[in-house]
Image (spheres, grey):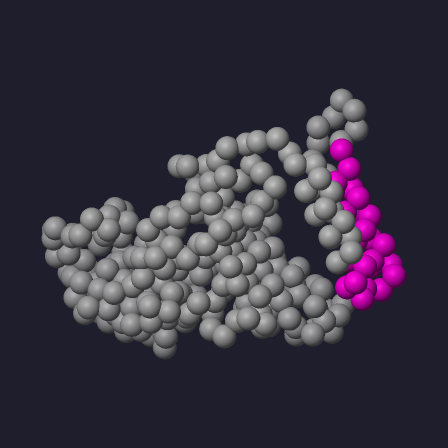
Amino acid sequence: MRRDQGRRTPDEIVSWCEKTGGDPVPLVAASRTSAKVDSAAVQDGYQIYHHAFFFDRDGEWAVVQQGMNETNGMARRYHWVSSRLDDFVCEPHAAICCDRRAPTLNLVARDSASARTTAAELARETPVRLVSELIRLKHLALPRRHAILMADIAPDCLGAILTKTYEAQAADFRELLMLPGVGAKTLRALSLVAELVYGAAPSFDDPARFAFAHGGKDGIPYPVDRPLYDQTIDLMQRAVRRAKLEPKEELQALRRLDRFFLPAPTGRQEPPP
């Protein structure tokens, strides 16, 4: 999915809520917050390129996002389920799946609670003070693991966004995260100051546990497992039939599945619409 398509998700949520009578406000907020968490607060080296948002008439929702690491060719998938969510910025994921793990700045880990609080407090400070602290820290000999924090922090370039965070006076980490312009670099800088100056260390544990896929997402392509694909298609068809859809909606969903899994016509290798 192209990034411009992902940005249309809020409009699509509103459109479907108009048809179903649901409240789009919390759903749009969930979509935007989950996307921001996985692109800025979980810094694992995977760039989010796919965002899928599912919801029902009762307001329950789920998110499936996928990121790609261009260096190792690996993919990573992030799963969210509203029924299992207590806090958007503290252990919010139902699962994070990948075949490879690495040191990760995980600002939504439970162990990062003090780092989140301190980062939000620092963002309310005058930018001059923060920039001076960062300039000083740049000249320190930091532990090896801090390479992921210091690699591209440019204190002078952060002045503009730190001015915005100071003016916004975000009440907590979630408000800070959702401010326009606050991204991975800003959060790295704030977490660095929070740990080295105030002793509020974030978690560097990779939250990914395991992966499941049909192939091609682990950096090494391999032959398609047709029986496994057929089993997946059957599972999806049964899920559609049990979803208590209107007859017309069920028929349309099954037809979309057929179009997706049918091979392209002879001589053409086009993706399904």
Q: Residue furthest top?
A: 267
Prevailing SS of the magenta stretch? helix
Residue at x-position 49% and y-position 56% = 96
Specify the quadrant that holds the C terminus: top right
Q: Residue furthest front?
A: 227
Residue 223 lies, with reference to residue 109, above or below; the image says above
Q: Is residue 10 visible?
A: no
Which stretch is magenta?
240-263
**The one of 93 and 8 positioned closer to us in this rendering:** 93
Residue at x-position 55% and y-position 71% = 84
- Please check the rendered image and state whether residue 243 is part of the magenta-colored stretch, yes or no: yes
Specify the quadrant that holds the N terminus: top right
Res. 195 image quadrant: bottom left
**The one of 118 and 258 positioned closer to us in this rendering:** 258
Count of numbered badges drawn on the protein: 0
Residue 181 at x, y percent in the picture:
39, 59
- Please check the rendered image and state whether residue 9 is part of the magenta-colored stretch, yes or no: no
Is 273 on the left-hand or right-hand side of 173?
Answer: right
Residue 124 at x, y percent in the picture:
28, 72
Residue at x-position 64% and y-position 34% = 224
Q: Residue furthest right?
A: 247
Res. 110 image quadrant: bottom left
Residue at x-position 70% and y-position 68% = 56
**The one of 233 and 171 positioned closer to us in this rendering:** 233
Res. 20 image quadrant: bottom right
Is 270 on the left-hand or right-hand side of 102?
Answer: right
**The one of 209 and 96 positioned closer to us in this rendering:** 209
Residue 166 at x, y percent in the picture:
29, 70
Q: Is residue 196 visible?
A: yes
Residue 217 lies, with reference to residue 156, above or below; the image says above
